Amino acid sequence: HAAERDYLAGVAFRRGVSVVFQTRDPVVAPARRIVAGAGRPLSALQFQAAPPRAGDVIVALGTAAFAAASEGEPEDLVVRRLAAEAERLAPRLLREVREVRVVRFPQALPRFEVGHYRAVARLRKVETSLREAGRRLAWAGDHLIGPRLEDAIASGLRAADALASS
């Protein structure tokens, strides 16, 4: 449908970059997630427990601005910058790192440019009218609500409810 193609053609995304640290031994994390302050290259640290005797996983999530600025930089520089920020937030957590991996996402988070929500509203109207005409399709995704995991889940639940009620 033309309205759907037009909407999807206008969806834009920001880049993302993360550094994943696998520790030698389990660490005592101060929390499951630590959010960094504004204006820093690191947006958050996430701690994920691994199986016993396997160490833990610490994920340093770079901000969208850091991801864009570090796009062409070598991985070791990205690791050094985000590791320094991680150490600032949670000192000594990275002292026994076994493995490090940089993960780059070319389309990590949706961008909500001016007019985006009006475009979503137009898409929803078309989607509803087509469903009323018998089409069994509902759109879902973080680009419809917001850039967080919770937004993607809410969008999926909304799509499931729409299909269940049609």
Image (tube, rainbow, N blue to C red):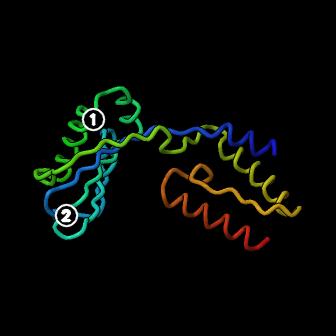
Q: Which mark is in front, 1 or 2?
A: 2
Say left or right for 128 vs 85.
Answer: right
Circle 1 SS class = helix
Label 1: how many Cα within 10 Å (few below 14, some 14–19, many 20+): many
Quadrant for residue 112, please give it.
Answer: top right
Q: Kindly report the distance in space between the C-alpha atoms of the residues bearing marks 1 and 2.
A: 25 Å
Circle 2 SS class = loop
Q: Which residue is drawn at 63% across and 37% down?
A: 114
Say left or right for 16 vs 93.
Answer: right
**Residue 141: horizontal and vertical position, in percent?**
60, 54
Is the C terminus in the top left, top right, bottom left or bottom right quadrant? bottom right
Q: Label 1, on which residue?
A: 78
Q: Which residue lies furthest to the top in this view?
A: 72
Q: Label 2, on which residue?
A: 54
Q: Is residue 89 above or below residue 6?
A: below
Q: Are marks 1 and 2 in contact (CB under 8 Å)?
A: no
Q: How many labels does the image show?
A: 2
- Given residues 118 and 129, the one toward you in this image is 129
Q: Which residue is drawn at 30% across and 59% down?
A: 33
Q: Residue at x 71, y 42 (%)?
A: 7
Q: Which residue is drawn at 25% across and 64% down?
A: 31
Say left or right for 1 vs 15.
Answer: right
**Residue 90: horizontal and vertical position, in percent?**
18, 53
Q: Which residue lies furthest to the right in this view?
A: 133
Residue 137 tag number: none
Does label 1 or label 2 sit earlier along the sequence?
A: 2
Label 2: how many Cα within 10 Å (few below 14, some 14–19, many 20+): some
**Which amino acid type is shown beneath numbered disc 2?**
Ala
Say left or right for 94 vs 136.
Answer: left
**Which amino acid type is shown beneath numbered disc 1?**
Val
**Residue 62: horizontal and vertical position, in percent?**
34, 42
Q: In this view, does 139 lie above or below 114?
A: below
